[in-house]
Image (spheres, rainbow, N blue to C red):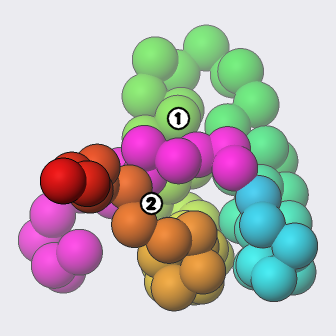
Amino acid sequence: MSESSEPTLPPYFPLKLKKCEDVSDSFFDCFDFNSAPNGDKDVGRQALIKCGTQLKLYKECMDKFKGSTKAVRKD
């Protein structure tokens, strides 16, 4: 994720692997707290921005341990 790009949820969200439990819980807690409905239509996007550090750590851990999501052709 570059500095200028807007944060997005990965396709495996809200999957939580045991090996990534701590960083997953940290991100989920932050996102849950900051995305509570408040009348702002952009509350979800703002929560992702506020929880950017936790989201980055969640993605890094999950990408490391979740395995490949690409289909592998077996001949």
Q: Which mark is residue 32?
A: none
Q: Is residue 6 left or right of residue 68?
A: left
Is 9 part of what is drawn in magenta? yes
Up-down relation of residue 35 to residue 65 (above or below): above
Task: Examine the rendering and report whether any part of residue 34 can be seen.
Answer: no
Could you tell me which residue is drawn at 78 percent across and 66 percent down? 17
Q: Is residue 36 left or right of residue 3?
A: right
Q: Amino acid at mark 2?
A: Ile
Q: Is residue 18 left or right of residue 56?
A: right
Could you tell me which residue is drawn at 44 percent across and 60 percent down? 49
Residue extending farthest front: 75
- Percent coordinates x, y for residue 54 in the rendering: 62, 76
- Percent coordinates x, y for residue 15 in the rendering: 69, 50
- Percent coordinates x, y for residue 6 in the rendering: 24, 56
Is 52 part of what is drawn in magenta? no
Q: Amino acid at mark 1?
A: Gly
Q: Which mark is residue 44?
A: 1
Up-down relation of residue 39 to residue 64 (above or below): above
Residue 36 lies in quadrant: top right
Q: Secondary structure at mark 2?
A: helix
Q: Is residue 72 left or right of residue 57?
A: left
Q: Which residue matches tag 2?
A: 49
Q: Earlier in the sequence, mark 1 or mark 2?
A: 1
- Percent coordinates x, y for residue 10 in the rendering: 43, 52
- Span highlighted in magenta in the image: 1-15
Could you tell me which residue is drawn at 16 percent across and 78 percent down? 2
How busy is the neighbourhood of tag 1: few (under 14 within 10 Å), some, or many (20 plus)? Answer: some
Foreground of the two, 32 or 17: 17
